[in-house]
Image: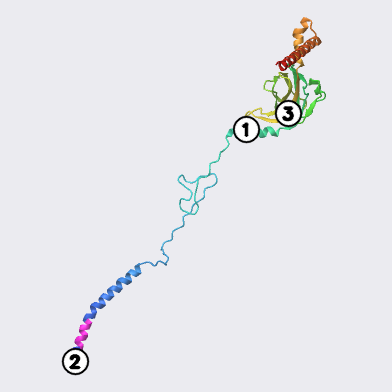
Amino acid sequence: MYALGKQRLVSGAKAMASALIPVCAVVCLVLFVVLGLGACTPDPSAEPTTTSSTARPTVTRPLPGESGPPDSKPGAGPGPFPTSRPASTSVPTSTAFERARRAKEILETCFQGELTFRPPSPMRQGETREFVLHVTLGDPGEGHEKNIPGPNPVQTRAPIVCEEMRADLSGPGMTVERAGNPSGEMLVPEQGVAEWRWWITPKESGRKTMTLQLFATAEDGPDLSLETFREDIQVEIELGYVLNALVKDWAQPLGVTIPVLIGAIGAILVWSRSKRRKAKHAANTTP
């Protein structure tokens, strides 16, 4: 009995061992697969590691006045500094630079000078009178006022005067003709005066304004005119000159004097005014 029981136990152990071997093999295979995939799957919280280091790209900023690459756009390209095209600025032309340089050279030769003239007011309509202007950089010389014609006192100004100047005179209702150099440009001496002359003829009666201007000019280089002085001169224009010319040309050959002509004109005005008054009175009393 004992031998029979022992034999049955050994047989049962062998049968159980033979049944557990496939089960263990299956369990081992499942563990191998699970563990292998877990080793290959990255952890989301883990940081990636690399075996080789890559240098950080660098971008050089363009210098002032230099533009970036042709295809560069703001915010494009690697690196933290975007490249962009510089804003286009208007560059003055060489002519503008030359004019500015020449104007500076002209003004460096300018100083406070002296200007002298006699106001022509009053004048008569149709009368032609000479207007003279003296300009100097230093001493105009004693007695130069005698060369300025006119009955009025001499007036003096202190404008900015340069080595080469041009004087212009103009006025509405007046004919102004330059005498001498047609361009009006003249070198101003340190001793003595530069003299300009005009012939002025008023064409209308009343108060008129003549404008006197001084310009600094250039001998060479671009044509420049820098205004350094301007003054408006008031001129009272009388109507009597036309009447005097009429009497001189027509009345005197006929033996008519100025008082007789003035009396005749006055009588005509009185007669015309009385006739107009009578006509107005008759119109008011007619039923």
CA–CA distance between discs 1 and 2? 132 Å
Between 139 and 92, the one lying in front of the other is: 92
- Looking at the image, can residue 17 be seen? yes
Q: Secondary structure at mark 3?
A: strand
Query: In the rendered structure, which segment of residues is drawn in magenta?
Result: 9-17
Q: Please report the residue visible at 23 percent of the width from the left and 82 percent of the height from the top.
A: 17
Q: Report whether residue 180 is seen.
A: no
Q: Position of residue 138 (x, y in %)?
A: 77, 29
Q: Earlier in the sequence, mark 3 or mark 2?
A: 2
Structure colour scheme:
rainbow
Residue 62 in the image: x percent, y percent? Answer: 52, 48
Q: Who is closer to the viewer here, 39 or 189?
A: 39
Task: Decide: is 254 above or below 128.
Answer: above
In this view, the mark in front (1 or 3) = 3
State which quadrant residue 226 falls in.
top right
**Quadrant housing residue 38:** bottom left
Give the number of the disc on residue 5. Answer: 2
Name the one closer to the observer, 53 or 208: 208
10 Å neighbourhood of mark 1: few (<14), some, or many (≥20)? some
Q: Are marks 1 and 3 in contact (CB under 8 Å)?
A: no
The amino acid at mark 3 is Glu
The answer to whether residue 147 is left or right of residue 2 is right
Q: Residue at x 22, y 80 (%)?
A: 19
- The residue that disc 3 covers is 231
Identify residue for label 1: 99
| Earlier-in-chain disc, 1 versus 2 | 2
Whether 96 is among the magenta residues is no
Quote the CA–CA distance across marks 1 and 3: 26 Å
